[in-house]
Amino acid sequence: MTEHAVMASITGYLSAHRSPAPEVGERYYPYSLDCGQGRELPGGRSMRPVGTAYLYTVKLHRSRSFDELKARMISSIREVASLRRDDFIRLRAGAVTTNGAVTLLPSAYHPQLPALVGLLVRGGLPYVSDEVVHLDPVLRVASGLDLPLLIDAGDLGLFPGIDREIAAKRRAENDGDLRFAVSADELGGRSGEARPIGRIVLPRFEPGGPTRLEPVSRSEAIFGLAQAGLNLHVWGDRALLLAGQIAAEVPVQRLRVGSLPEAADLLLSSAAVG
Amino acid sequence: MDAAELRRIEEAAGRDDGSHEPHEDAAGWSTEDHYRLLSVPLLVRTMHPRFAEALGWHLAPFRREEPGVGQGEVVDMWEREEADEGFLEVGDEAPRFVYFRDGHTRVASLSGLLSFAIWDVHAMVPKVALDFLFLHAGAVERNGAASLVLAPMDAGKSTLTTALLLAGFAYLSDELGAIDPVTTRAYPFEKRIALDPEALAHFPGLEGQLEDAGPLSADLRQRYVRPEDVGTTVGGPTAVGSVVFLGSDRSGPPRLTEVTHAESVARMVPHCFNLDRHGERGMVLLSRLAAGAGAFALEGGTPGERAALLAERLP
């Protein structure tokens, strides 16, 4: 894959954010990618190039898999884009839109959360976010960053037709922290817009266990939202107050996720009913 | 990557904005004090105990024993060993002391740096804290209702705030109306009230109550008032009951005229420090604030007369 092809792929992921010119006072973060050079070896064999992704001059990741490099760049861009947004209450949560409102999936960090969102998007629900949701404290709408999902390598098998390359070295190391960027388009879905929260589902990942929706008390709902808070140190009790208000206004359930496809089907069918 | 790591990356990459790196003299801090100004953690590191003590008095309302959670602001202050032509020099005394925050350096005399530090630390808050909408306003509270006094710089906000405290209101701020987006309440930003020396003439006997003449502070031009100096306390987060636009006409007796909600929103906009960051939701928040508060224009009168009128008319 050429540098041009890799960058075209990344800029495609970022197309919603393209800016014609820098605004005065805006801070820009320079990302770059060196795709390296392959080598021809004796005997007709070839050595694939090693690519390196940078932020400023700091190396983010180095790999022979350009799919890995793309994911690492998107992951870093997402973190940079979200870190200084304390004008929002930030939650670790998946989000899709259903019937004009956001279904929020707040969760402590879990690698399977993006795949659950991906299955919902593939099922036809517009995509808001796979892991980071910005909750507007005034307008009370939830939004994502309009960046691709970062799906765990172990869950890619749930998405036939989505193939990503794992570098041989990484495969040998069996590194658990390996994710790949997948856009809503690639899943056959589309992006949703910022919307008020219409439903809260607290996923609990228990692989192999039963998959079912359960009612939760309002205090459990607030606790679940608080656990998902990424900047509670900034918003403090005001975030809990808002969580309490939202939990009082919309249905809240717990989703025990024994199987990702079953969990997605359960949510899709309940969304259709709703 | 967290905020601290991103900051390290940015610092490692350097910035092309003319900022300086901390001087190599800056090591072995004798004092490290932690503060929290609204949601902004602040660490002040100095090699000069008198400076730490003096700045500590001014920032005492915000003092914390522990650093707390989150990436905060850092102020470094040290004494440089010899002249460095690369620094901006200000002040009357030999400028040997260095103040460093957010990539920018200031060199001045010790008292010059204290004056700058007091201004810089407080002015930093509305630029850095994104979880509030900030109005340039004095703020007081009584009977569960906050009153905001909006005016441009040097229009008499701090003087009127002091007069209102003497009239029985509790203190929130003499500079910032910190509006919480979730509740639309005004939060206290209880900095020392900064008065020009001439303003003390409006408050007979107050000068004798002040305790602002500690180390270095005696050299500052402005005088600093604590709520307890005027017999009041700091209020808590409070719903805004009234907004007062302070006019420049000081002739005649004080006059309070009502302002419509729509006009009050328009008149609040120029007094917002960070409306650009909040955009549409900022306007919605101002509208909510205006809908729940009476709005008035205040002209004429001395600070005492104005405060007496407001004490009579406001909730």
Image (tube, grey):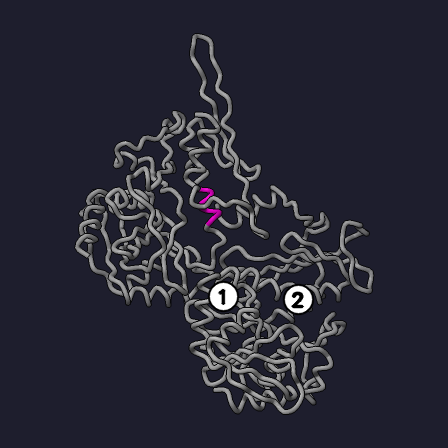
User: Magenta part of the protein: which range?
Assistant: A75-81
Q: Position of residue B255 (x, y in %)?
A: 58, 89
Image position of A164 with respect to A109: above or below: above
Disc 2 to disc 1, how far (Cα)?
20 Å
Tell me: residue B173, above or below residue A24. Answer: below
Question: Residue B59 appears at what percent x and percent y?
Answer: 62, 69
The label number, if any, that marks residue B132 in the structure image: 1
Q: Amino acid at mark 1?
A: Phe
Most frequent secondary structure within the magenta stretch = helix
Q: Residues within 10 Å of mark 1 (few under 14, many from 20)?
A: many
Residue displayed at 68% across by 86% down: B206
The mark that comes first in sequence, 2 or 1, is 2
* On-image quarter of the N terminus of chain A: top left
Residue matched to label 2: B119
Report in which chain the residue with disc 2 lies: B
Q: What is the x, y in percent for residue B107?
A: 75, 57
Q: Which mark is residue B278?
A: none
Tell me the subunit letter for badge 1.
Answer: B
The verdict on residue B10 being magenta is: no
Tell me which residue sits at (51%, 32%) in the image. Answer: A33
Look at discs 2 and 1 and give the one toward the viewer. 1
Callout 2: few (<14), some (14-19), or many (20+) C-alpha neighbours within 10 Å? few
| B109 relative to A159, above or below | below
The three-letter amino acid code for the residue at tag 2 is: Trp
Query: Residue at the top extreme?
Result: A43
Q: Residue at x 63, y 45 (%)?
A: B15
